[in-house]
Image (cartoon, helix red, strand yellow):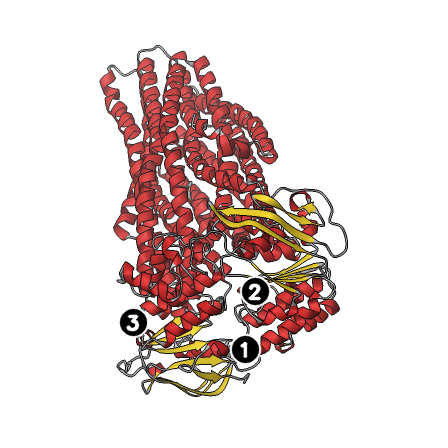
Amino acid sequence: MTAHLTGRRGGPVLGVLRLLPRRRAALAVVLGALVVLCGAGLLAASGALITGASRRPETLFVLLPLITAVRLFGVARPALRYVERLVTHDLTLRLVGRLRAGLLAALVPLAPAALTGSRGGDLLARIRTDVDELQGVFVRLVAPAVVAGLAGTVAVVLTALVSPALAAVLALLLVVLGVAVPVLARRAGRHASVAAARADAAFGADLLDLVRGLADHATGDGGATARRVLEAHLDEQAAAERTSARLTAATTALREGVPALGLLAALWLVGWDVTTGATDPVLLAATALGVLGAFEAVGGLGAAYAAGEGVRAAAGRVADLEARRPAVTDPPAPSPRPADPTLRLRGVSLTYPGAPAPALAGLDLTVGAGEKVALTGPSGAGKSSVLALALRARDPDTGTVTLGGTDLRELALADVRAVSAWVPQAPALLGSSVAANLRLGRPDATDAELAAALGAVGLDALLDAPGLDGWVGEGGSRLSAGERARVGTARALLTPAPLLLLDEPTAHLDGPLAARLLDHLAGLDRAVLLVTHRPDALDARWRTVPLGAP
Amino acid sequence: MPAADLTAGPTARLLRLPPVRRLAAACVALAVVVWALLLVQWSLVTAVVVGVVEGRATPGSAAGLLAGALAAWVGRAGVVGLRDLLAARASSRVRRDARRDLALALLRLGPEGAEGERAGELVTTATEGVAKLDGVVARFVPGAVTAAVVPPLVAAAVLVLDPGAGGLLVLGGGLVLVFLWLVGTRAARSSREQWETLGRLGALLVDTVGVLPVLVSTGRARGSVRWLADIGERYRAATMRVLRTAFLSGFVLEFGATLCTALVAVTVGVRLFEGQLPFATALLVLLLTPEFFAPLRALGADHHAALEGRPAAERLFALLDRAGPAAGGRPVAPGVPAVAWDAVVLRRDGRAVLDGFDLALPPGSRTALVGPSGAGKTSAVRLLLGFGDPDAGAVLVDGVPMTELDRDAWRARVAYVPERPWLLPGTVAENVRLGRPDATDGEVATALERAGAHFVARLPRGVDTPLGEDAARLSGGERLRIALARAFVKDAALVVLDEPTAQLDAGTEADVLAALDDLARGRTLLTVTHREAPLALHDRVVTVAAPDRPRAAA
């Protein structure tokens, strides 16, 4: 699924519109226009019926077509409305699915490297609020606009049959209420809507910070700092909402008030025609009420323009995310995947963007097939960076990283990552079952294989509680940090990769458990490159490579 | 009444909030004004139409009536605008208060109380959930008040004008309400389920982004996109099932309204034809009939919004009401305290985490807690910090049970460095000041110096360097030093460390231990550790054995 959220041509909003299911969208707007016209038709037919009856025709049969029309419009309107709402919502939910998938697809090339720089909470808020904003693109923006155009045009044409002058007035008022008022409101509300969205996202990030660091906040200053930051964002939000509220009130007043002008124009213009005998008196109340009903066509447009601003801002942010350049990309013509998994770093230097000093400078390192290598050294010596280079999460500034003699930059990313299995220091888990987390390593692993992998990392206990199908909590929160790290290692063991890249796999383990895990790793026939602070726990099967601060 | 299922429970509680009550009262007054203006407006319009149709007047001679109708109409539009303004303000106020209270409740509950909550779901409640209260306050309240006031008054007016048509309105309106109540209760049930699905979907999305680096590295990222799409598809199908029922109430309302309008038009028309009714009365009745249903129809849409807000209100109040640990008021004695666990039993999910745990820490003592993972060391520490209470036994501070203490005052005396300290997205200095917000620049610098955080000097903007989300660029050792600086600047009487050196190499560990030795001077120190090196710092080493847990030493 490679749904692109942003079109190559014509703004980010158009890109979102391209994701709409077209036939359903067309059906929804036609139904919407018919609903409006049925409402106006009901009012007009009723007005004609009453006036016709007041003129006492010789027989009731003269009124029969009007009676039938009144009943038809009365029944058709609610039925059409019901179907229209279902079609519209179904379409919106389909759109949401495509949006979410597209956004995640946009994030994939950015992971793992670029995701660490952006605030995770901000990313979360962005995905959630922006998708929520964008999902309204049809219901709140497209549908009201197209329905207004369709139903408004039909109403104006029908009015012109009675009084061309009144049709002109109606068209003018529809444009005022449907275009001028919302455009002015939109101009006035632009800042408020952007500010509200920003404050909303900031509040979400604040709260995530508070939830995740609750112990630190509570024991730090009792939460005073967190509260101050949070309240400041809430104040910003409230201020933005006050502006929006005034604007909403003004548009409501206009939406309620402007139709009065249409009704009065009808009474005046058609009234004179009736007085002069140019028009049948039956048409006076009918036209006046029909014109009144026609204003429903533009009733939803006020909200549409306000929504449009939010949609555009959200689409823009999503497009920014998609346009962000990934740290690494596939080569145009990848070399074939080398059979030999020997990893070799030659004269490699790496400086992170914005960092004052290089993380690695002129490093040489070789890990042969099946070899067991441990990287040691003080914090900040660049041990984790070596793993990032081996995985091609990043490219070195100078020097080369090769796999079986081929530069990683000449290989397909998928091939590089199929050769190695990487376990970060604090591997993330899915809020799902133990088994689902392990099967991220190998989707077709049997339960017995999963159990064996858990045994290898000393997590047999997880088989009893919570069990393979037991829920691990959000992000694995029901497991301890040590258990999460070992689930990550077990996941890597399940992959068929001939090279394991492990970042501090024993950090949370006590002596015997750490020894058991290291022993298991040393006994594998695959190559292992691990980062550790405790070289004392390694036996002769390991080659230790000390890294000094560059 | 569509409000019938909303008058009990969390929504009712929301409606009783002072800003909402004030709003409702204002809406009643405005609704009466709206009704009066409606009568004036349509009476004048009727007079003009009847006059012109019957040839007794021209639009020119009726200009005064037209101007009157216009004035009444414009006045009514202004009143409705004012109502919206008041409603939006009240809603903004309610949501702001709810968000603040939620954050305060989190702090009151502490990590133990909030642990059962999945972080994503909690954030969903505070952001999306609270946002849905807008539907209740800004839309449902004014809509419901208008629907309760205007239609009965309109019906009364029509009854006076023409009892027949009035009776039809009352009957039709009553039937619509009965049907609405029937379908409304069903929709409320399904809406709750929908909310739960939404919450779970939210939690999964957070995790999917979190786990993305690993997914990418194992080449499973494309699969996860598909997986997410599957969940989205299930979500769509479930929601559509809910909506088919939920929209029925809208259908019934709309159907009742248009059918009643059609019936009134036809019956009035026939009676007019038969000469039983004057034209003016018939026309005014016809014009007033849609006004009887308009507030009810508007409420149909608002009612849907209110239904969405109800589970949100439920979750919100459930969180706000959740009892935190008992709040005592006894002040904490000054000086370095003696703390003790006295036969502490702590159960979680039915199994004992601590079973008769006894330990006393004399003032100024240095104690290391060791033992297998899962033996309850961290749980014991959390009880000492006042996060949660034991199921039996007591945690004592200078002989006073924790349940009687002012917990905030107690935590102000404790410096705690968890296994993986959480760093704020703010600057280094802001992170240090979490220990003591009024610390001077000099004190912050000294604390960083004593914690051995020399790397800060090399950061691009020193102590003013923003760390970003959970300080992703810092190493474990660097994070720890900032957390230690926090403890230094706090000048606490009790220092509690959870695995302080788990992620450090030997050289760094020695430096950190020297800093810890300095930190512990003149205070009571408690350290949870797996490692050998920190033990030397301590007077004694206490081994915690796992209670009867069916786990391997994990």
The spot of residue B530 in percent (x, y) is 54, 66
Q: CA distance from mark 1 to mark 2?
A: 23 Å
| Mark 1 surroundings within 10 Å by alpha-carbon count, few (fewer than 14), some (14 through 19), many (20 or more) | many
The spot of residue B143 in percent (x, y) is 48, 32
Q: Give the residue type at disc 2.
A: Thr
| Mark 2 surroundings within 10 Å by alpha-carbon count, few (fewer than 14), some (14 through 19), many (20 or more) | many
Quarter holding residue A468: bottom left
Q: Secondary structure at mark 1?
A: loop
Query: Which numbered marker is on residue A380?
Result: 1
| Mark 3 surroundings within 10 Å by alpha-carbon count, few (fewer than 14), some (14 through 19), many (20 or more) | some
Does residue A378 appear to the left or right of A366 in the view shown?
right
Q: CA distance from mark 3 to mark 2?
A: 35 Å
In this rendering, the label closer to the viewer, 1 or 2? 2
Foreground residue among B157 and A326: A326
Q: Give the residue type at disc 1.
A: Gly
As displayed, is residue A225 above or below residue A27? below
**Chain letter for mark 1:** A
Q: CA distance from mark 3 to mark 1?
A: 31 Å
Q: Secondary structure at mark 3?
A: loop
Residue at screen point 48% across, 34% down = B140
Q: Which residue is mark 3?
A: A496
Extreme-right residue of the structure: B334
Query: Which numbered marker is on residue B529?
Result: 2
The spot of residue B324 in percent (x, y) is 59, 43
